[in-house]
Amino acid sequence: MAAGYTYILGSDSGTLYIGVTSNLFKRILQHRDGTYEGFSKKYGCYRLLYYEQFEEITIAIGREKQLKGWTRAKKLNLILTKNPTCKDLAEHWGATILFAGESIEEYEACSLALCSELGSKEKG
């Protein structure tokens, strides 16, 4: 059985969303780029405030159901036990890493050149 994650997202206005997934990294990126439809997209919940990892997805699903039954105050207390400043735990997930002396413009130019080179090799 696959591993699973239960997670809590927050919006800038304070709305909380509780979800479950087998791939936390991918799911958070989906929330951020708007490809995951539903409540979280409608209310702008994209900041990862809390998560738990489980050995089996079925356990994560059970935990999700439990958390959804909690009061808002209890959910906030849970978040604050692991994330007292309520920072976005996935703030830099999916970000491009630049090395010392590199600029984003250089990186983008290099990426465009590489894509162009790869495209011409595929055609040729």
Image (cartoon, helix red, strand yellow):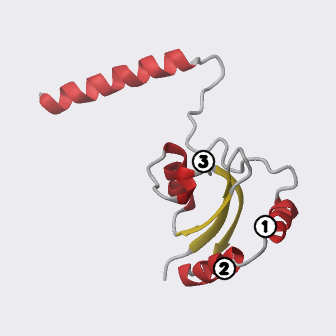
In the displayed structure, 5 sits above or below 12; it is below
Instruction: Tell me which residue sits at (59%, 33%) in the image.
Output: 97
The amino acid marked with disc number 1 is Arg
Closest to the camera, between mark 1 and mark 2, is 1
Q: Earlier in the sequence, mark 1 or mark 3?
A: 3
The amino acid marked with disc number 2 is Arg
In the displayed structure, 27 sits above or below 32; it is below
User: What is the secondary structure assignment of the residue under circle 2?
Assistant: helix
Q: Give how far across and how far down residue 14 sits, in percent.
A: 74, 51
Q: Earlier in the sequence, mark 2 or mark 3?
A: 3
Q: CA distance from mark 2 to mark 3?
A: 23 Å
Q: Give how far across and how far down residue 26 sits, in percent.
A: 50, 55
Q: Is residue 117 left or right of residue 55?
A: left
User: What is the secondary structure assignment of the residue under circle 3?
Assistant: loop
Q: Disc 1 designates what residue?
A: 72
> Residue 67 versus residue 114: which sits nearer the camera?
67
Q: Disc 2 designates what residue?
A: 63
Q: Disc 3 designates what residue?
A: 44
Q: Residues within 10 Å of mark 1 (few under 14, many from 20)?
A: few
Figure quadrant of residue 102: top right
Q: Give how far across and how far down residue 61 sits, in percent.
A: 58, 79
Q: Is residue 72 left or right of residue 7?
A: right
Q: Confirm whether residue 5 shows in the render.
A: yes
Q: CA distance from mark 1 to mark 3?
A: 18 Å
- Determine contact: label 1, label 3, CB under 8 Å: no
User: What is the secondary structure assignment of the residue under circle 1?
Assistant: helix
Q: Give how far across and how far down residue 4 sits, in percent.
A: 57, 73
